[in-house]
Amino acid sequence: AELRTFLGLLLLTGNVRLNRLNDYWKTHDSCSGKGHTVKVVMKLMSDFLGKGHSLFMDNFYNSFVLSSKLLRHSTYTTGTLRIDRLHTPPAVKAKALGKGETIANYAQSVMIGKWRDKRMVTYISTQYDNEMVQTTNRRNQTRMLPKPIVYYKSHMKGTDRLDQMVSYYPCERKTLRWHKKIFVHFLQVVVVNSFYLYNMYNSDRLSLYDFRIRVLEELLPPKEAPLLITPTRNSMHRLSKLTKRKGNGKSVTRRCRVCYQEGKRKETVYYCAVCPDQPGLCELGCFDKYHENK
């Protein structure tokens, strides 16, 4: 019950409620068509423009056009950029860099830069220049990073961490319709955010795997107690097969006790190994008949 309190009540990113998700798929969509991402961001930011806010975005949204437009509304942007975006400077695209090297171009107060770490990273900012700054990681190792990357990581690590945690247990399938994929993704986000909230307010911290197992156990109906089957006397007996052979190679047999009582002579290789005298019994019928009154 405690887990259910955390699960499914509010859709959270970090600790901020997303109360405007319907802007993405209204039937009277004013954000469709060319420049969709720019329209979506401008609509979601409409209440915050002109106030000097800083907006951090990943490469799905960032572009020179969007950064310029937001800057005209006194809103600063920083984030990663897809290198094939329109208006990315050719000099930045083509420049070959060694590890730790960087290059940047400026136009209309928008900076687009590229930096090589383990892989190439392209970024855009209207707030920070391309100065290299020293940072220290959790292992107390120092290295130089472009200032936009430092601030982007600082502000976006929660979102990137969420994406990473969701990716550990992928549930989306290619065969699912798009609206079902959205539902499954949101459910995954709810589980991860519930996991963070649970660990935040409980001393018995869980791993994501254990938390998911606990959620499943809470959602599933209670287990029914297994039926206790009292073994019958007959079920305690067992039919065994003689393995000894005669000198001529034929199997040793015994006379069937039931057939003998009925005036029939019949040899069998089967017997009851539990009965004290281990009587010979035919495999079919005689075994049950012999033990009915025992």
Image: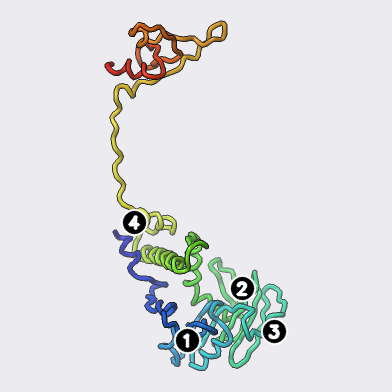
The amino acid at mark 3 is Pro
**First in sequence: mark 1 vs mark 3:** 1
- Residue sitting nearer the eye, 257 or 168: 257
State the mark number for residue 42. 1
Give, as a three-letter code, the residue at label 2.
Arg
| Mark 1 element type | helix
Tell me the residue at 32%/17% (across/down). 289
Q: Are marks 3 and 2 in contact (CB under 8 Å)?
A: no
Q: If the image is split into quadrants, where does the N terminus sit?
A: bottom left
The numbered mark, 4 or 1, whose residue comes first in the sequence reads 1
Q: Is residue 224 above or below residue 178?
A: above
Q: Earlier in the sequence, mark 3 or mark 2?
A: 3
Q: Residues within 10 Å of mark 3 (few under 14, many from 20)?
A: few
The tag on residue 219 is: 4
- Identity of the residue drawn at 53% across and 80% down: 61
Q: Is residue 141 above or below residue 263?
A: below
Between marks 2 and 4, how big is the CA–CA gap?
47 Å
Tag 3 residue: 90
Residue 143: image tag: 2
The quarter holding residue 143 reads bottom right
Looking at the image, residue 249 sits to the left or right of residue 183; the answer is: right
- For marks 3 and 2, give the CA distance: 28 Å
Q: How far apart are the alpha carbons under marks 1 and 2? A: 36 Å
Which one is earlier in the sequence, the residue at label 2 or at label 4? Answer: 2
In the depicted view, which residue is nearer to us: 146 or 165?
165
